[in-house]
Image (cartoon, grey):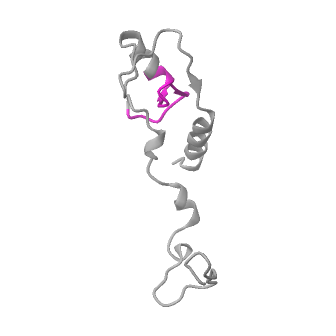
Amino acid sequence: MSGKWNDPIVILDEPQNNEVCISDHVDEADLYKLPTPPQFLCPISGEIMVLPVTTPTNITYCWTKLSFWLDTNPTCPMTRIPIPRGTKMYRNLILEELIGEWKNNNKK
């Protein structure tokens, strides 16, 4: 019995027919010069997040933009769910690290 998951995997060493290797056309350094991933942008400002924090609604924002928002609107900017004063926010360290790496790789 042979299904698609049981078929052997074929690894090609060289391009065949009309296949193209990325390395044939793109300088490796250019692979890092990509547009800003949308996940790195603050939903409030549309700018790259600095000190990303995640709210209880599980949405991440730039802390400075979110704190300004919460001063006048005690709700999640995206969902409008109330966020009472004193609610714990968690720093999104993984996203912060990814943004830092992306910035280092995309210096112009």
Compared with 64, 10 (above or below) is below
Residue 34: image location, x then y, percent: 47, 54
Q: Residue at x 42, y 34 (%)?
A: 47
Residue placed at 41% from the left, 10% from the top? Answer: 71
Q: Is residue 50 magenta?
A: yes
Q: Is residue 105 above or below residue 8?
A: above
Q: Is residue 46 left or right of residue 20?
A: left
Residue sitting farthest toward the front: 1
Residue at the (44%, 37%) spot, across then down: 41
Residue 26 colored magenta?
A: no
Coordinates of residue 60 in the picture (x, y in percent): 49, 31
For the image shown, how many numbered marks are present on the structure? Answer: 0
In the displayed structure, 23 sits above or below 8; it is above
**Where on the picture, by quarter, is residue 7?**
bottom right
Q: Position of residue 106 (x, y in %)?
A: 53, 49
Q: Nearer the viewer, residue 59 or 12?
A: 59
Residue nearest the observer in this picture, 108 or 48: 48
* Residue 103, position as x, y percentages in the image: 55, 43
Which residue is at the front of the view, 1 or 11? Answer: 1
What residue is shown at x 64% (from left), y 82% (from top)? Answer: 8
On the picture, is 65 further left or further right than 86? left
Q: Quadrant of the image for the N terminus?
A: bottom right
Tell me: 105 left or right of 69. right
Question: Residue 82's quadrant in the figure?
Answer: top left
In the picture, measured across the screen, residue 38 lies left or right of residue 3, that is: left
Q: Which residues are magenta?
A: 46-65
